[in-house]
Image: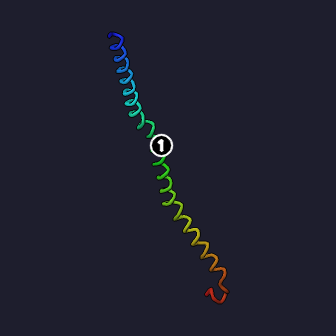
Amino acid sequence: AQAMVYRSESASEQDAQRRREGIYNFFQVPRNLEPLLLFGYLACVDAFIDQCTFLPIRVLFAAAQRLGRESRSLSPSQRR
């Protein structure tokens, strides 16, 4: 009878150990996930800053090039 009690305690200890490991894993997920979330956030911020800074500069350069081409393509009589 004592051997069965010992086995049942051992089984309950193993069960408790498995539950404990599950809880530890549950608490480790946010710590392991935060760097990935931070990387995603920084990638989005980088794309937004790119659109807000470089895109207007590219538009200005393209407009200046087009105006330059149009002014060169006009004949001297059309310039005045």
Using a 10 Å C-alpha cutoff, classify the residue at mark 1 as few (fewer than 14 neighbours), some (14 to 19) or many (20 or more): few
**At label 1, which amino acid type do we have?**
Leu
- Seen in the picture, residue 39 relative to 16 is either above or below; the reply is below
- Residue 17 in the image, given as x and y percentages of width and height: 38, 23
- Residue 15 in the image, given as x and y percentages of width and height: 37, 24
Quarter of image, res 64: bottom right
Q: Residue at x 39, y 34 (%)?
A: 26
Q: Which residue is mark 1?
A: 36
Q: Residue at x 66, y 79 (%)?
A: 72
**Quadrant of the rendering where the N terminus is positioned:** top left
| 12, 57: nearer the viewer | 12
Q: How is the image coloured?
A: rainbow
| 25, 10: nearer the viewer | 10
Given the current orientation, which residue lies at the most extreme bottom position? 77
Q: Residue at x 63, y 88 (%)?
A: 78
**Quadrant of the rendering where the C terminus is positioned:** bottom right
- Residue 24 in the image, given as x and y percentages of width and height: 39, 29
Q: Residue at x 60, y 75 (%)?
A: 66
| 14, 33: nearer the viewer | 14
- Seen in the picture, residue 62 relative to 12 is either above or below; the reply is below
| 59, 74: nearer the viewer | 59
How many numbered marks appear? 1
